[in-house]
Amino acid sequence: MIAPTLTTRQLDERLREAGVHHFSALEVTRLQNAGARRRVGAATVADLPAVMLDTVIALALFLEIVRARASEISGRDHKVSVLGWYRPGADDSGARGWRGDYNVACGGSKGSSHERAAGVDLRSGTSQADLSQALLEVWRDTPWAAGLGTYAWGRRHVDLVHGDGKLARHWKSPLVSRQLGAVEIGNRVKTQRAALDDLGCETVRPPSGVWMVRDFDSRIVVADMARRLR
């Protein structure tokens, strides 16, 4: 049985209360991969598990900051499209009665930040270069920013530190690696591990080699993002 969820309307209300005005609940919960939906028998929209609310608010506030910075760089209102946010994993898909793992059917990896609504894929409707620059700048200015990925065909990915999630890293694409090297990533991981240790959060390094955090309260990130938006 699936855990308590928030309807699209309820999630929209919570996002607006938190100060999110340019990203909607439907962008979080719409399952955009039609082929994956057919393969597993998924609905078009998957109501968000309530336990993921703070994670979603934190990431949405981060995106508000990115959008504002991209607009400054572009010199005009910068349109940002969400290509994929929440993607139910094996357990969540099974609890919904689907025939398989929606996240994997999309081509996502098991344990992806999308499974916990802590990662989002984006595309610019104004300038890909300006969005990439804004993402990089805000990533560097946000201690809790974790994954950053850029794909040649236009998709951008970003995720934040979250419970059972990975710490700082970047996709092995030259579009990111040229600007965000291993040393900077390594320093960010050290900073994040120290901050998590101060909070009493356990960090582990599984065989994959990417540091992870076990229990983490995303309200910490929500508070940090809200301060930055003021």
Image (cartoon, rainbow, N blue to C red):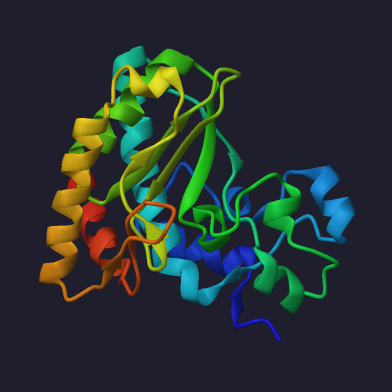
Q: In this view, does 218 lie to the left or right of 224?
A: right
Q: Which one is nearer the viewer's eye here, 29 or 72?
A: 29
Residue 215 x %, y % = 33, 75
Question: Residue at the spot x=46%, y=41% of the render?
Answer: 22
Question: Residue at the spot x=25%, y=51% of the render?
Answer: 144
- For the question of whether residue 228 can be seen, the reply is yes
Q: In this view, does 34 lie to the left or right of 92?
A: right
User: As drawn, which residue projects farthest toward the bottom?
Assistant: 1
Q: Which one is nearer the viewer's eye here, 53 or 96?
A: 96
Question: Residue at the spot x=23%, y=73% of the render?
Answer: 201
146 shown above or below 25? above
Q: In this view, does 4 lie to the left or right of 164?
A: right
- For the question of whether residue 227 can be seen, the reply is no
Residue 11 x %, y % = 53, 65
191 shown above or below 72? below
Quadrant of the rendered structure where residue 222 is? bottom left
Residue 1 x %, y % = 71, 86
Question: Residue at the spot x=82%, y=69% of the render?
Answer: 98
Number of on-image labels: 0
Residue 217 x %, y % = 30, 72
Q: Is residue 35 left or right of residue 178?
A: right
175 shown above or below 203? above
